[in-house]
Image (cartoon, rainbow, N blue to C red):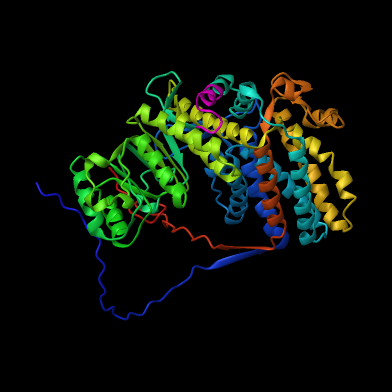
Amino acid sequence: MAVQVFRSSLSLRPSRRTSLVVRADAKDIVFDNDSRRKMQKGINKIADAVGVTLGPRGRNVVLEQDYGVPQVINDGVSIARAIELEDPVENAGAQLIKEVAGRTNDAAGDGTTTATVLAREMIHFGLQAVTSGANPISIKKGIDKTTTFLLDKLVENSRPVKGSGDIKSVASISAGNDEEIGQMIADALDKVGADGVLSIEESSGFETTIEVQEGMEIDRGYISPQFITNNEKMTVEFENAYVLIADENISAVKDIVPILEQVMQTNRPLFIITEDITGEALATLVVNKLRGVLQVAAIKSPGFTERRKALLQDIAIVTGAEYVAKDLGMSVAKATLDQLGTARKVTIHKTECVLIADQADKEQIQARTKQIKKELAETDSLYDTEKLSERLAKLSGGVAVIKVGAATEVELEDKKLRMEDAKNATFAAVEEGIVPGGGSTLLHLSELLPAFKETLTDSEEQLGVDLVQKALKAPLKKIAENAGVEGEVIVEKLLGSPFEMGYNAMTNKMENLLESGVLDPAKVTRSCLESACSVAAIMLTTQAVIYEKPMPKKASQGDPNVGADGMPVMNV
């Protein structure tokens, strides 16, 4: 039976000249204090909704959905993204504070609630100063200088992770003090190592389990966003996919069509890793994917020059594929199904890809690992040592898959979000070390600011230092309030105490948080500070907001047969 592949064709036709009239919607402008005050209302609404989840005694938030059951979640960034306000100026403020949560989530994967609460307080105190006549540009300079100083002090006071006990503590705190999740993350990291990859999937049963599978993470994203299969997460997700690995720059349709026709007959997805795909070849892949003829996606080869070839050979071994190399006289145009590997699951993001394979030959992996270790022992280059260590971790560690189980869909979604936060916090801790948690690190950093303030000569820049100092107390106060105690009292008790001392909201005690296991990743705290200070500085320098005038609703003029939207109503 002949199989048809849709090819991309471009044709140039003479276009008729037509007159086009563009009519822009009317705009409204709000200036000065009015604009800032209304934006602050939107910021407060987001921060209030997100703030209730902060700390071990924080509460959940229910998200109503157009379809399915409501979501009950404890994740700050998910709550913030779900909020859209009716007033356009308030919504502009809400979007700014969402940016804080989004940036922190992108940089560290956790700490979004802390960053939101911190930014709200900085904006609150900053607007007070601006309203009283201070120069917002000078205040912004003061905030920027304070941020740089605090980040240096944060590095000085952080310490590296020591063993699985610290990993369990970090993961547990990030997951809302869930020790079961913390233990699972620690066990998974023990199996794959600190450089390994953790993948979180849904389980078909009620229990949450850990499996270690051969696979690797590739630092390349999809070539075209048209390949996306999950629009909510903006990812490409394939199961039981063929894998084609080559080092060609594919641009002609005739090079790619033969293998596409063979794969289409099997009704399985195709995942392509090659130097690049451009022109008609890329257009052909996109057209076939959009028309549902073939599930296909492609990424560029990772690495550069000789290292690129070595990485492609590593991926070929893991997937059981044959590396289609130009050096050996091979080409994609002559490739067959026998030369393709198999991946049980492929997840491609914008900038990275996780590949889980079941077809790997254990003996080949062990031989490859032995070869890399030999190269590692012989090299004197620091760069080569780092890159060889990365390859070794990906080959020998594989991917730890945590399959999350729950009794209901609502519980499953909440548990998956907590697990994601715990995973991100753990890798952040391994990367940049840990600091005392529970908001105490930010409080103790605020005690260093009076001395730093004296080094500044501009009085309005000093106002920037003052507002950051006041705002740094907010996360600890909110954690205490969510635990049912007076936040101001807790802050006063901790001021002047050693850096490692803090408030444990679970036990309602002041104690050494490093010893009791209440830890935060230094990277998360750094990202919170950077994001909050950045958006607060931008907000303070805002002088006007321009927005589209809302369209007036059509009146039904009292006619019972006409709805509020002006459409006829059918009475049954």
Residue 54: which quarter of the image? top right
Quarter that holds the C terminus: top left
| Residue nearest the viewer, comparing 49 with 475 | 475
| Residue nearest the viewer, comparing 509 with 28 | 509
Can you name the residue that lies furthest to the front here?
378
Residue 214 seen anywhere in this rendered image of the structure: no
Residue 152: which quarter of the image? top right
Q: Residue at x 38, y 41 (%)?
A: 313
Can you name the residue that lies furthest to the left here?
1
Q: Is residue 188 magenta?
A: yes
Q: Is residue 142 magenta?
A: no
482 on left or right of 305: right
177 on left or right of 253: right
**Does 501 sit above or below residue 262?**
above
Q: Position of residue 308 (x, y in %)?
A: 44, 48
**Does 405 sit above or below residue 54?**
above
Q: Residue at x 30, y 59 (%)?
A: 283
Q: Look at the image and give the residue range highlighted in magenta.
A: 185-196
Residue 258 seen anywhere in this rendered image of the structure: yes
| Residue nearest the viewer, comparing 102 with 37 | 102
Q: Position of residue 476 (x, y in %)?
A: 74, 33
Q: Position of residue 561 (x, y in %)?
A: 34, 52
**Does 569 sit above or below residue 475?**
below
| Residue nearest the viewer, comparing 249 with 350 | 249
Q: Position of residue 42 (x, y in %)?
A: 63, 49
Q: Main secondary structure of the magenta part?
A: helix
Q: How many marks?
A: 0
